[in-house]
Amino acid sequence: MRNLLVLQHLAADGKKATQPCMCGFFNDPTRECKCTPMQIQRYVSKISGPLLDRIDIHIDVPAVKFKELASETPSESSAEIRQRVVRARQVQQERFAGEKLFSNAQMTPRLIRKHCRIDSSSKALLENAITRLGLSARAYDRILKVSRTLADLEGKEQIEASHVSEAIQYRTLDRNYWT
């Protein structure tokens, strides 16, 4: 799905994902970062806030621990995940029939107001996040679009506070590096 983007590397070192710093270990719970605060700030400042604002989802992806890799605990299968995604895409196709849109990511402000209505507790949650994190109007719209997608994935007609909360969590770079 197009609106489930992870920040691709925008610096010139050829890697496929952005590292949190030059050595790659800033905020890593198991390894020590060798970078100074000034080096970290200079490194992350290569990605401007307005550019970051245009990306719907950005998350930190920590290294997977051996115990988790070797675990035999059953998890959701790819087929099950695919079924959920296909159902959510069908809902979106029906929602946007006649609109020349294919996904929630393409919604205009008018369509966001129409299809992304939230209750008062969700509004309070979002207001708090916008205020505390200093998020922009663009980030507000993106959080609502992602919330709509999360509700679609759960098969819910209404966006719930849990969807808004999860969508806010997908703004980790706003929280960790640019606030």
Image (cartoon, grey):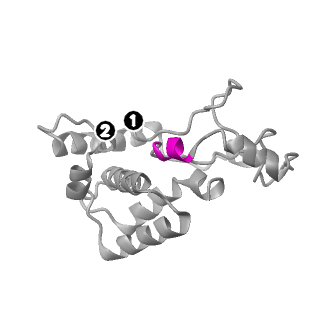
Residue 110 lies in the magenta-colored region: no
Q: Residue 16: which quarter of the image?
A: top right
Q: Which mark is residue 2?
A: 1
Q: Position of residue 9 (x, y in %)?
A: 62, 32
Determine the CA span between mark 2 and mark 1. Answer: 14 Å
Tag 1: Cα neighbours inside 10 Å, few (<14), some, or many (≥20)?
few
Q: Nearer the viewer, residue 164 or 40?
A: 40
Left or right: where 55 falls relative to 37: left
Mark earlier in primary sequence (2, 1): 1
> Which residue corresponds to the image point at 79% horizontal and 38% vertical from the top-left?
22
Tag 2: Cα neighbours inside 10 Å, few (<14), some, or many (≥20)?
few
Q: Position of residue 26 (x, y in %)?
A: 77, 49
Q: Residue 133: which quarter of the image?
A: bottom right
Magenta stretch? 49-54
Q: At label 1, which amino acid type do we have?
A: Arg
Dividing the image into 4 quarters, which one contains the C terminus?
Answer: bottom right
Position of 115 relative to 66 (above/below):
below
Name the secondary structure under disc 2. helix
Q: Which residue is mark 2?
A: 86
> Which residue corresponds to the image point at 57% horizontal and 54% vertical from the top-left?
174
> Which residue corresponds to the image point at 71% horizontal and 26% vertical from the top-left?
13
State yes or no: discs 2 and 1 in contact (Cβ < 8 Å): no
Left or right: where 135 falls relative to 140: right
